[in-house]
Image (cartoon, rainbow, N blue to C red):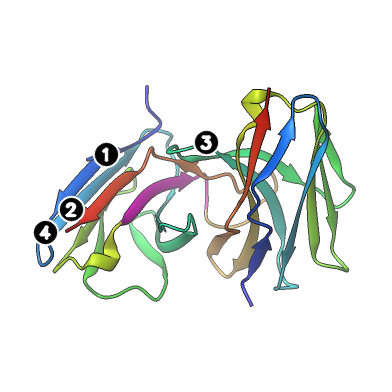
Amino acid sequence: DTAVSQTPKYLVTQMGNDKSIKCEQNLGHDTMYWYKQDSKKFLKIMFSYNNKELIINETVPNRFSPKSPDKAHLNLHINSLELGDSAVYFCASSQDSVYQAGNTGELFFGEGSRLTVL
Amino acid sequence: RKEVEQDPGPFNVPEGATVAFNCTYSNSASQSFFWYRQDCRKEPKLLMSVYSSGNEDGRFTAQLNRASQYISLLIRDSKLSDSATYLCVVSLYGGATNKLIFGTGTLLAVQP
């Protein structure tokens, strides 16, 4: 059973289009994340949700809109795609967002969704 | 200055060699520290946490120097399967958030 699964794995689209990436985790975690990994392999956090509530919103263009229908799902919708949006987008989950004894801070990542904007 | 800095490498080493990676972080309020491993075209996975007293897991040893804001990873007796990118990760806690900041990674290539 895949712990964190995201679809699609590959996405090739034209500039100006709107696309969505879906993510689901079956680990029972409270917190989910979207990270972007660019061509230089730099992994940068975009958003984080804890129990469907947005708790981290980094400086991301408002063309990117996350949605969490329940704590097991976090989807990412991107409007008006630009060339610079080409990257690998990783969904991740963790046990909790707040440090507690026993919380290792470990993130469990999905396999990534490779987005190419032409 | 980047929040977490690493030498990107690549480090090309023969099998059996010992190799060390270093990492520095800029925020002295950082609370927890980790090394993640990312294979080519795969997702990052936790390799080990880094504790103040230093810790070892088989061939891997991690060290933390809070005064110098410096983290290291030592790999002994390198295997071909150790070839990957090693990501230094620092955790910041603020209110209800637990934000993991990733370094850009150090690429290790172990040669037969």
Q: Do the residues labelled 3 and 2 touch (CB within 8 Å)?
A: no
Quadrant in the rendering for residue B78: top right
The residue pinned by badge 4 equals A14
> Gap in Å between the C-alphas at discs 1 and 4?
17 Å
Foreground disc of the pair 1, 2: 1
Q: Do the residues labelled 1 and 4 touch (CB within 8 Å)?
A: no
Q: Which of B28 and B94 is in front in this view?
A: B28
Disc on res. B78: none
The answer as to whether the residues below labels 1 and 4 share one chain is yes
Foreground disc of the pair 3, 2: 3
| Residue A92 part of the magenta segment | yes
- Letter of the chain that mark 1 sits on in the rendering: A
Note whether A52 is above or below A72 in the view shown.
below
> Gap in Å between the C-alphas at discs 2 and 4?
14 Å
Q: In which quarter of the image is the N terminus of chain B?
A: bottom right
Q: Can residue B88 be seen by looking at this rendering?
A: yes
Specify whether A108 is left or right of A21: right
Question: Mainly helix, strand or loop, the magenta region?
Answer: strand
Q: Earlier in the sequence, mark 1 or mark 4?
A: 1
Query: What residue is shown at x 68% (from left), y 22% (from top)?
Result: B112
Note whether A104 is above or below B77 in the view shown.
below
Disc on res. B39: 3
Where residue B40 sits: x, y (%)? 48, 37
> Gap in Å between the C-alphas at discs 3 and 1?
16 Å
Q: Are marks 3 and 1 in contact (CB under 8 Å)?
A: no
The answer as to whether the residues below labels 1 and 2 share one chain is yes
The residue pinned by badge 1 equals A9
Foreground disc of the pair 2, 4: 4
The residue pinned by badge 2 equals A20
Specify whether B59 is left or right of B94: right
